[in-house]
Image: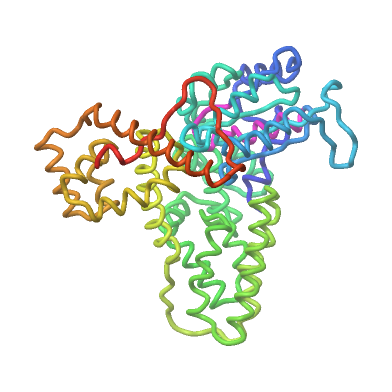
Amino acid sequence: MLWVEKYRPKTLSDVVAEKKVISEIKKWAETFDSHRKPLLLAGPPGVGKTSLALAIANTYGWEAVEMNASDQRNWEIITRIVGEGAFSETLSESGEFLRSSEKRRKVIILDEVDNIHKREDAGGERALIRIIKKKPPQPLILIANDLYALSKELRGLCKLIQFRRLNVRSIAKVLKRICSIEGIKVEEGVLEEIAKNSGGDLRAAINDLQAVCEGKEFVKLEDLAIAKRTQETDVFKVLQMIFKTDNDAYSASMLLDETPEDFIWWVSENIPLEMDGEELFRALSRLSRADIFLGRVRRRQFYRLWKYAGYLMTTGIQVIKKERKGGFTRYKTPSFWMKLGYSRGRREKLKKVLAKIGKHSHMSMKKAHNEMFYLIKALMERLDDERCARISAFYEFDKEDLEFLTNAKKAERIIKIIEEKNLHMVDESNILDGFERFERKKRETERAEKADGDTNRKDVKTKGKKVKEMTLDSFF
């Protein structure tokens, strides 16, 4: 078992923090009905924000519901899960009905809230602000690494507790307590060195301590140097243990700086190098089963299932192998990651282009993708450079956008024309002409549909000023 989980503080009295911070949190929890403000815990990774949130729940007997960065968190998900959860009563694990009016609550913990999408099509932060303004009866705890990535409005609606990186002395004190419980003796200076290397990250310090103490009753300073030298090759050593030895590969995999969701790609990539035939089929079946457990973790946030997935992808594959291949095998980095990196880069470029099309055509990114993107891409590939330059100037495409839509040589020619002819500003009369043609075409279409007896068409009404969608008519 990982020591970061084993020694996670159970209640507020176990938390390593300033007395003033604990006092403020207790006051927030005990007077929640009078203010109904969310608690915002902000600070660098590894200082105990998530542990503190769970300790609050344990201290006051609240049921905890967690959402973290692996969850999809757009406006719809936030409204459905956080919104409904914050306004509804709850049941305990034993089935007992818990009333918020009797201070028997559930607390919704929203981790890495600074990564929630704010604009574009997602609107997760805006949905969260709407929920908070309604003052839900169930407490919300928001956790952020970067406080100023949040909007000023959201920060102002919360009770803010800021964390600083822990000092060496505080971290060393926690490490000493762990060593005492585990019955491990350490040379003077070892714990201070680990604490120093952690950079104020308690979680990293505990992980480093566990890695150094593995299989030892006494730890010396020189063991730290060995641990640092071997850190980068750990994943390859674990693969070697799985495929070539009968050693405890599961325990070794738990010390990797990789989650089971990452490590499964390493195993999947390298199984064919060590197995074939019936053994390969059985190994891939075990890996498939492990992937099912990982899928359940993603959907249900039930992280105990990581243990079963870990056993299946290590020990489960070890026992299949009847004969070990001798010699050296050059294990490969997952090829999927390289493809994913390329794909992610293209998605980011597409997103950037769609944002510009949506902005200037007065439509959402989704609509821009469905109705405008492929037309613009086709035009940019087929039209002459001057017309492409006019389109590019209107949509404010830069060189990177143009290379994505056409090719590098054409992008350079288009940028040159924009600079030479000063096309950075589009003539307003052209835009108005485009609108006029758009409206005329729209009226003609409506008359034609009416003549055809289309009775299913519904007029879309918008509040306030009507926004027209810009088309490419203004350029032709």
Judge whether residue 277 is colored magenta: no
Furthest residue toward top: 34
Displayed quadrant of residue 427: top left
Q: On the rendered structure, is 260 left or right of 434?
A: right
Residue at the spot x=61%, y=70% of the render? 287
Residue at the spot x=53%, y=76% of the render? 271
- Please state the horizontal and vertical placement of residue 103, each as a whole percent of the image: 82, 22
Residue at the spot x=74%, y=12% of the render? 34
Q: Is residue 223 above or below residue 277?
A: above
Judge whether residue 54 is colored magenta: yes
- Range drawn in magenta: 41-59
- Please state the horizontal and vertical placement of residue 433, each as a whole percent of the image: 28, 31
Displayed quadrant of residue 72: top right
- Please state the horizontal and vertical placement of residue 69, each as a whole percent of the image: 56, 42
Question: Which quadrant, please, contains the C terminus?
Answer: top left
Residue at the spot x=42%, y=43% of the render? 368
